[in-house]
Image: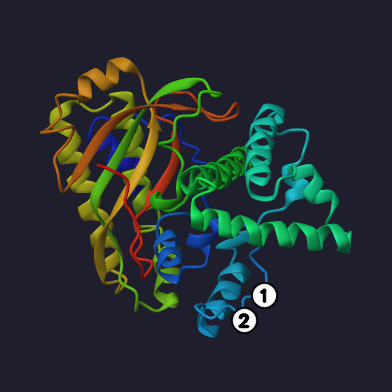
Amino acid sequence: MDSWASLNLVGLTPMSNQRKELVALADPITAFNETALKRLTVMFNRIAIQGLFVDLSKVHFITPEFIKARYWLAELGVLFDLDFQKLKSPSAHDQGKTRELFMEDMNSFTQRSFGISAQEMLAARNDKAKFAEIRKRGDEAKKKLEDGSIDPVKMTELSLRLSTNMMRMLACHLRDVEDVDAYLVMLPEFSSFDQDDPRLPKHDVVRICIGALPVPVDHVPWQQFIEFRNDPDTNGSFLLVKDWMSEVARASLKPPQIEETLEDFISRFRTNLGSHGINTTTTALWAYVVTTPEVLEMLAGVGPDWGTRGLFWIEPFRIGLLPAEPTTPGSVLAFLPQIDLGFPVDKPKS
């Protein structure tokens, strides 16, 4: 049964019979992680990776086999690099305000670290003497971070906001220029969505967490993922889960239906993966979805403490949105999957 038939069974009406391609814009850490890419391959039609064809042969934690797999997936069209010239197309939304915010944060970061503006750093790229001075200042900044002269918490916040906002801006460009359903995918530990940015207009958003999303185990061969993707009866299984998040934020599902519908969609996803020999484990998946105050009030009564712990939970937020980001209720802003990186990191509060 296809995705739209499943939605109709729970009383949801498709907004359109024509679905855009579901595309993930993977942040660098996700793009370099084989476990993460395998999971995204069964969730999205295509995955955009900035610098896809950069030489990774000397990166010690990336195996030659994974490098070959990335090239193979690129040949199949599953992975693709970002075309920055195309993303600068006049057809894209005006990103002037976003660029101003980005440069403001960049200057704050470089002034604290190096004592010069971002523009001065860029201008020094081809000047050996100036570049050497910048490197010297960088070494001094490391010492200041260690002795507390530079606030490490503030620098981390700036760094996270810079990287997150850059990826958010690229996702907006990708949606406009390629006419696809593109979403930023990044690890929750490296996201700045929870930071308060007084420069941006606030909107009501729900952070939805699915506590036990079925995902492939690490040892599944890449070929089985392609077989899963090529099967019209199983490909697009994650679309049901993604649409469930949107419908929750739009209040299209009545409270009793919310948990029941998600359980069904997660079961279908797991079964469809298993039908192609893809053994699964479970992980958490967060998503930020635009909503309204009225929906938040309705959701406050759904399960204990904003949701049923274990299966899903929902938290209300008011966060600043970039000028080109969607403000329509039900619009997903980003997906944040939990991935074990092999070293301890803080998780977002839930």
Q: Secondary structure at mark 1?
A: loop
Spot occupied by residue 100 in the image (x, y as percentages of width and height) = 69, 31
Q: Quadrant of residue 273?
A: bottom left
Please state which amino acid type lies under the numbered disc 2.
Lys
**Image quarter for residue 225?**
bottom left
Point out the frontmost of discs 1 and 2: 2
User: Residue at left 34%, top 45%?
Assistant: 286
Tell me residue 194's x, y (percent). 40, 36
Question: Mark 1 belongs to which amino acid?
Answer: Asp
309, above or below 267, in the image: above
Spot occupied by residue 344 in the image (x, y as percentages of width and height): 33, 63
Instruction: Determine which of the numbered discs, if any, sits on residue 55 in the image.
Output: 1
Query: Marks 1 and 2: CB-CB under 8 Å?
Result: yes
- Could one spot residue 129 in this view of the protein? yes
Q: Is residue 48 visible?
A: no
Is 90 left or right of 98, judged from the image as shown? right
Q: Residue 299, which numbered label?
A: none
Residue 150's x, y, as percent?
A: 54, 47
Label 1: few (<14), some (14–19) or many (≥20) C-alpha neighbours in 10 Å: few
Residue at 62% of width from left, 60% of height from top?
Answer: 80
Which residue in the structure is indicated by mark 2?
58
Say how the picture is coloured.
rainbow
